[in-house]
Image (spheres, grey):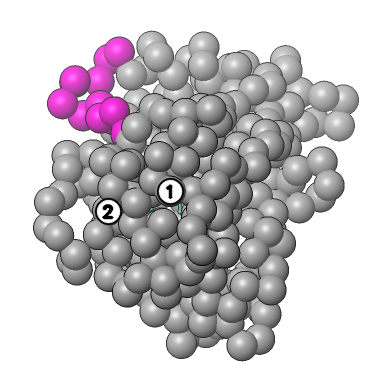
C-alpha cells in the first residue's frame, strides 16, 4: 500500500468486505435514479464537466471513472483501499491510462495542485481521520478546482422499512466480534457538519443539496441492492438465507400493483472549491 501504513480496524473491515464484494456499490446504485433520470454517478460526472484532471477518491471498481473517461483528453486518477475493487477498475479498457493507486485517502500519493476536480461517490463518510482527508483534498486541488461528492443520507420506503424491522433481530443473533465496526466520521453524514469540516480545511462555503434516488423494483431486486450494505457482513450464509426468505415473504404485502417494492435512498451532493488564489 502506498502512503502511510496506518490502517485502522475499520479500514481492515472495508478491505475484507470489498475482497468479497468488489463491485457492490455499482451493483446497488448504477440503476438508482434521481427525479431527473440521472444516477448519482452521472450527477457527479456532470458537476465536473469541463475539468480535465480528475481524481476519484474511493473509486471502488471504477464505474464513475469510466463515465468520466467518455470525455476525450481527460487525465484520470483513482485511489482506493481495496486491491480487489481496483483490480476490477484496472480491467476496464476505458481506464487503461488512468492512474489507479491502492492508497489511503488520508495520504494521497499525488503532488500539490495536481487536479482540476475531485469526485467521491459514497466513500467520504466511511473515512476515519476525516480532517486529514479534507486537508489532502484541499492540497491536491488547484486554486479554482472543484470537489464534488455524494454522501449517504439514509433510506426510506417500504423496502427499507422492512429491512429495518427484520435486520436488527438477525444481527442480535450474530457474535459481537463479527459485527460491523463504526465506519467513518458521523459528521460527514450531516451537510452542516460536512460544510464546517470543508471550510476549516480551506474550502469556500459549499453548495449542498439532498437528492432522493429511486431503488424501487421487484422485491428480489430490492433485496439484491440492500443486501450489499455493510451491515450484512456479520451474517453467515444460513442467517442471510433466512433473512432473505423473510424479506421476500413480507415484501409481497407491500408491493405496488405493478409488483414494485417502493424503496429509496437519499444522498447529499456537495460541491466546494479551495478558498485560495
Ligand atoms: C461504498 S464504496 C464506493 C465505491 C465507489 N466510489 C462507488 O460508488 O462505486 C466505498 C469505497 O471507499 C473506499 N475507501 C473507504 N475508506 C477509504 C480510505 N480511507 N482511503 C481510500 N479508500 C477508501 C472503500 O475501499 C470502497 O471501495
Percent coordinates x, y for residue 276 in the rendering: 48, 58
Label 2 residue near ligand 1, CB within 8 Å: yes
Viewer-side label of 2, 1? 1
Q: How far apart are marks 2 and 1 (CA)?
A: 16 Å
Give the residues drawn in magenta, as a range: 172-183
**Horizontal arrangement in the rendering, residue 229 relative to residue 216 (left or right):** left
* Residue nearer the viewer, 102 or 30: 102
Name which of mark 2 and mark 1 comes first in the sequence.
2
Instruction: Look at 60% across and 37% down and name the residue there.
Output: 268
Label 1 residue SS: loop
Q: Which mark is residue 138?
A: none
The label shown at residue 202 is 1
Which type of secondary structure does the marked residue at label 2 adopt? loop
Whether 91 is drawn above or below 60: the answer is below
The count of marks equals: 2
The residue at 25%/20% (across/down) is 174
Q: Is residue 54 magenta?
A: no
**Farthest left residue in view:** 5
Residue behind label 1 places its C-beta within 8 angstroms of ligand 1: no
Can residue 111 be seen in the rendering of this structure? yes
**Residue lying farthest to the front in this orientation:** 277
Q: Can I make out residue 218 in this image?
A: no
Residue 170: x %, y % from top left: 37, 17
Task: Tell me which residue sits at (39%, 46%) in the image.
Answer: 201
Quadrant where the N terminus lies?
bottom left
Tag 2–tag 1 contact (CB < 8 Å): no
Query: Which quadrant would residue 264 be assigned to in this image?
Result: top right
Q: Is the magenta stretch mostly helix, strand or loop?
A: loop
Residue nearest the observer in this picture, 7 or 47: 47
Residue topped by disc 2: 106
Q: Residue at x 45, y 42 (%)?
A: 198
> Does 81 sit left or right of 95 as displayed?
left
Amino acid at each position: 500500500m502506498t502512503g502511510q501504513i496506518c490502517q485502522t480496524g475499520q479500514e481492515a473491515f472495508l478491505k475484507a468486505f470489498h475482497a468479497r464484494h468488489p463491485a457492490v456499490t455499482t451493483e446497488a446504485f448504477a440503476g438508482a435514479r434521481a427525479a431527473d433520470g440521472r444516477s448519482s454517478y452521472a450527477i457527479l460526472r456532470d458537476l465536473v464537466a469541463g475539468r480535465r484532471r480528475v481524481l476519484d477518491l474511493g473509486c471502488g471498481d471504477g464505474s464513475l471513472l469510466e463515465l468520466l473517461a467518455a470525455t476525450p483528453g481527460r487525465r484520470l486518477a483513482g485511489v482506493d483501499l481495496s486491491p480487489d475493487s481496483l483490480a476490477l477498475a484496472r480491467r476496464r479498457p476505458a481506464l487503461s491510462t488512468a492512474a489507479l493507486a491502492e492508497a489511503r485517502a488520508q495520504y494521497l500519493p499525488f503532488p500539490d495542485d495536481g487536479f482540476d476536480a475531485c469526485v467521491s461517490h459514497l466513500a467520504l463518510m466511511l473515512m476515519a481521520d476525516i480532517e486529514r482527508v479534507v486537508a489532502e483534498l484541499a492540497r491536491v486541488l488547484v486554486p479554482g478546482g472543484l470537489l464534488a461528492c455524494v454522501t449517504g443520507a439514509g433510506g426510506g420506503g417500504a423496502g427499507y422499512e422492512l429491512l429495518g424491522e427484520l435486520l436488527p433481530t438477525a444481527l442480535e443473533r450474530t457474535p459481537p466480534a463479527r459485527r460491523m465496526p463504526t465506519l467513518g466520521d458521523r459528521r460527514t453524514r450531516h451537510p452542516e457538519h460536512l460544510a464546517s469540516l470543508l471550510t476549516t480545511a480551506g474550502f469556500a462555503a459549499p453548495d449542498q443539496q439532498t437528492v432522493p434516488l429511486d431503488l424501487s423494483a421487484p422485491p428480489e431486486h430490492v433485496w439484491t441492492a440492500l443486501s450489499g450494505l455493510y451491515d450484512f457482513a456479520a451474517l453467515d450464509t444460513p442467517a442471510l438465507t433466512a433473512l432473505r426468505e423473510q424479506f421476500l415473504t413480507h415484501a409481497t404485502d407491500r408491493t405496488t400493483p405493478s409488483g414494485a417494492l417502493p424503496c429509496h435512498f437519499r444522498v447529499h451532493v456537495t460541491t466546494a472549491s479551495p478558498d485560495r488564489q
